[in-house]
Amino acid sequence: MGNSAAKIIPPPKIHVAILLDGNGRWAASRGLARSEGHRAGVSAVQRVVRAAPALGIHTLTLYAFSSRNWDRPTSEVDSLLALLENYFRAEAHECAAKGVRMRVIGRRDRIPKSLADAIEFAERVTASGRNLELRIALDYSSRDAILRASCWMMSSLEVSDREFARRLGQVTHAGGPVDDVDLLIRTGGEKRLSDFMLWECAYAELFFTPLMWPEFDGAQLKAAVEDFFGRERRFGRLPESAVAS
């Protein structure tokens, strides 16, 4: 007698990108320095990294420091970069133990050497991780990356989406082509992309929440992912109901 049980098909693995917005406003609403908001934001990063693999997320890209953020007060920039450096050094071994691979995307020619060394350390220690690829966008600008990849492509005989994605991965230190973003989350109540992964987000589902980033946790990430899986993604095609009729 054959097995009549229905075959269980696991949900697809997805790429989630998050704009970590609202650290400063969270701190200001509590009478704290903006640096305390960024510090609280690190705890939120730890929470979502722990929750991500069980939710079917294979790649998690976090927008930590935009190229435009250099225009902020020097004291805030220095504090944020020091916080990032400490994060890479402090979290590397724990991420490695949990199978989390850390990568940093963006430019590396303008950051302090000590931060660049911390990035290299974290990427080396976690290189064998397979449960989750955690990508931190630092001194990142999608427009800048697209422009530099386009200039590189001018000398190439091959022009295709895949080849351009490969070049884009190289100029941002992503290690090659990266899967398109499936779900883009922005905290803090704003509703814009802010020069974040414009190429990779061409068909991303967008999820906006008024919660400030320090308030975001695994439950909020789960709610966003469940909302994503409840949507019908058509990629320019007709809805299934229209095809059936």
Image (tube, rainbow, N blue to C red):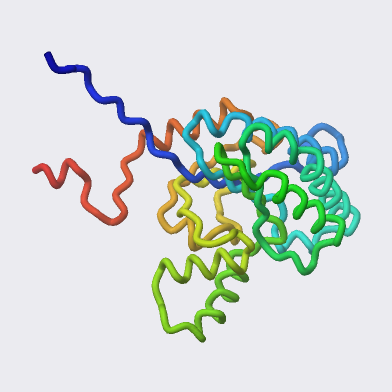
Q: Residue furthest top?
A: 1
Q: Position of residue 203 (x, y in %)?
A: 40, 54
Q: Quadrant of the N terminus?
A: top left
In the image, residue 202 sits, relative to residue 125, either above or below, namely below
Q: Residue furthest bottom?
A: 155
Q: Quadrant of residue 168?
A: bottom right
In the image, residue 98 sits, relative to residue 175, either above or below, namely above
Q: Quadrant of residue 111?
A: bottom right
Residue pictured at 82% horizontal, 49% vertical: 85
Q: Is residue 58 left or right of residue 76?
A: left
Query: In this view of the protein, can residue 23 be seen by the observer?
Result: yes
Q: Residue furthest right?
A: 75
Which one is nearer the viewer's eye here, 29 or 59?
Answer: 59
The mark total stands at 0
In the image, residue 110 sits, relative to residue 53, either above or below, namely below
Residue pictured at 58% horizontal, 29% vertical: 51
Residue pictured at 89% horizontal, 59% vertical: 74
Query: In this view of the protein, can residue 19 be seen by the observer?
Result: no
